[in-house]
Image (cartoon, rainbow, N blue to C red):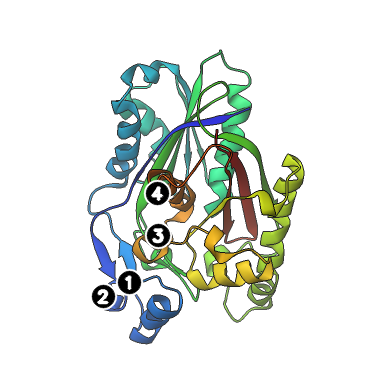
Amino acid sequence: MMTLETLASYVPQKRLEVEREYQRLGLTQNEARVFSRMYELSHCPVEEGSEEEMLLKPCKELFQQAPHIKQEVVLLVYAHTGTISGVWGQNMASLLVRRLQLPNAVAIGTSSNNCVSIFSALSLAKHYLQNALPNSKALIVVGEIADSFELRIVPNVAVIGDAAAATLLSLNGKGPSILAHSIHNYPGYSQGIWLPTNSDAYRDFAANYQLRLQSVIQDVLRQADITMDEISYIIPHNVNILIWRRAAEFMNIPIEKIFLKNISETAHCFGADMLINLHSLKNSEELHSGDKVLLISAGVGGLFGTSLLLYS
């Protein structure tokens, strides 16, 4: 069974105040008020350096305590949302392997599942480690910079913040075990962020959002043979507070189970949300042995994903 050995995250200190600095986000004042007051997306972290340096920060933190682990890393998976990451023509995954000096690591990037790509990365890591030498580890890196208005704002849905996270995984290490994970893909939304908000497809996606979120959760619970009542915490993507309140009501989940403390400070950080939130929850010392934790995300293009962790 794959375990999540160590975890690190980085969120830039610089924050834009959405309601006050709305023009820098490409918003009207009224749009900014909706995002800030209704969706509680009041702040947006902005990275002033390069995407490469931002991604390296959580990775370096992981290796600071045990530099020798670099020899055991056989795979680096960079999960990102935008098709292009960093400089055009540059392979960010390979660049990270070189900068981190990982002599035995194969570099892979994945972005086809947008904000659910973190779960694709987990699947890639598991399959690769199953055919690797004992004690081998995989490094998953996730995050990117929203460097245009189109990336910074998902209309009527989310404000996008800059951030990065990284985690080391193995098949025989210590840490929370990954009991199950699943991705559901629904056709008809291939326009992604360019899907017109007045289209039938957009309305269909919104109308079925909660049901499909529930479906992927139930899939993972069935795989692990547990019930929702046994879940201690739900770690969401930070799309907005309103969606999660509706989800809690739709699925009859106590809102207190859903970790929502970061939404107002980090906004939605593409696929990095879950690891950032998990890192925050871990640092809060509220997790205990035996706790079961659900990581949940949805992505434009009709994608829904979740993973189930068991803390020991």
For disc 4, the neighbor class at 10 Å (few under 14, some 14 to 19, many from 20) is some
Question: Which of the two discs, 3 and 4, labels the residue nearer the N terminus?
Answer: 3
For disc 3, the neighbor class at 10 Å (few under 14, some 14 to 19, many from 20) is some
Question: Which of the two discs, 3 and 1, labels the residue nearer the N terminus?
Answer: 1
Task: Give the CA distance from mark 3 to mark 1.
Answer: 20 Å
The residue at 55%/52% (across/down) is 233
Q: Which residue is mark 4?
A: 280
Name the secondary structure under disc 3: loop
Q: Which quadrant of the rendered structure holds the C terminus?
A: top right
Task: Give the CA distance from mark 2 to mark 1.
Answer: 7 Å
Task: Give the CA distance from mark 4 to mark 2.
Answer: 27 Å
In front: 195, or 208? 208
Q: Can you give x and y, in whole percent of width and height, for residue 266 in the image?
A: 36, 60
In the displayed orientation, state which residue is furthest to the bottom: 30
Q: Which kind of residue does numbered mark 3 sit on?
A: Asn
Q: Which residue is mark 1?
A: 25
Question: Which of the two discs, 3 and 2, labels the residue nearer the N terminus?
Answer: 2
In front: 252, or 69? 252
Q: Are marks 3 and 2 in contact (CB under 8 Å)?
A: no
Q: Which residue is mark 3?
A: 262
Q: Can you give x and y, in whole percent of width and height, for residue 186 in the image?
A: 71, 59
Q: Which kind of residue does numbered mark 4 sit on?
A: Ser
The residue at 33%/39% (across/down) is 58
Asked if residue 77 is positioned above or below residue 75 in the image, the reply reads below
The residue at 66%/67% (across/down) is 209
